[in-house]
């Protein structure tokens, strides 16, 4: 059986959800960090949990809607790279939160964002090398550039805005494009 090198709709839908949910969380964090919005005190303890919980709920809906995974070997390879990024991001968020708590500095958590975009860039680079589509190389390079830019912003409110823009540009929008093109095929 020949491999068509396409990601399944499920993978694209996960990208849309991740970019939208965590991009919105980044915008909210930027608004709060920049002093442009103040959340009610009762919400604040829960604000680190709402986006991950919403994302997990989204995953359950996505996996119910799109139960089939990739079929061909190369498609499974690309899908596995994205799955590894997801698991790595979850583990990395716990590790950076623990390090931030231990160090007593939220700035340690700020290092999460550049690492996030390095992981995304690596998965996009794998997709580019397997599919040899220049657009995928561009998305990978954009992710790597965002990693560098967010590294410069650690400790600044603008870090959150850059994270949100990066998630929308390099995760959500490619997810929308991929999902739409997979529906046409």
Image (cartoon, rainbow, N blue to C red):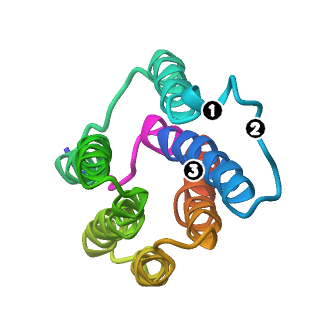
Q: Camera-side residue: 20 or 43?
A: 43
- Residue 34: give x, y in percent of width and height: 72, 64
Q: CA distance from mark 3 to mark 1?
A: 22 Å
| Residue ID at (52%, 58%) | 171
Residue furthest to the front in view is 104
Q: Which mark is residue 44?
A: 1
9 magenta-colored: yes
| Residue ID at (66%, 59%) | 33
| Residue ID at (50%, 29%) | 49
Residues tagged 3 and 2 counted as in contact (Cβ below 8 A): no
Mark 1 or mark 2: whose residue is earlier in sequence: 2
Local crowd size for mark 2, using a 10 Å CA cut-off: few (<14), some (14–19), many (≥20): few
Local crowd size for mark 3, using a 10 Å CA cut-off: few (<14), some (14–19), many (≥20): many
Q: Is residue 64 above or below residue 105?
A: above
- Residue 53: give x, y in percent of width and height: 50, 24
Residues tagged 1 and 2 counted as in contact (Cβ below 8 A): yes
Q: Which residues are magenta?
A: 4-13
């Amino acid at each position: 059986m020949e491999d068509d090198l396409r990601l399944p709709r499920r993978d694209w839908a996960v990208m849309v959800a991740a970019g939208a949910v965590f991009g919105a969380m980044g915008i909210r964090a930027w608004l709060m960090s920049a002093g442009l919005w103040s959340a009610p005190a009762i919400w604040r303890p829960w604000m680190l949990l709402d986006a991950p919980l919403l994302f997990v709920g989204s995953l359950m809906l996505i996996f119910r809607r799109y139960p089939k995974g990739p079929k061909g070997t190369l498609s499974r390879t690309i899908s596995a790279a994205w799955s590894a990024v997801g698991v790595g991001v979850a583990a990395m968020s716990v590790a950076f939160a623990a390090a931030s708590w231990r160090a007593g500095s939220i700035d340690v958590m700020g290092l999460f964002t550049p690492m996030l975009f390095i992981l995304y860039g690596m998965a996009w680079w794998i997709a580019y090398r397997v599919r040899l589509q220049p657009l995928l190389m561009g998305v990978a390079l954009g992710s790597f550039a965002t990693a560098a830019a967010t590294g410069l912003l650690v400790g600044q409110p603008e870090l959150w805005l850059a994270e949100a823009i990066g998630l929308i540009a390099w995760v959500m929008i490619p997810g929308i494009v991929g999902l739409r093109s997979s529906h046409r095929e």
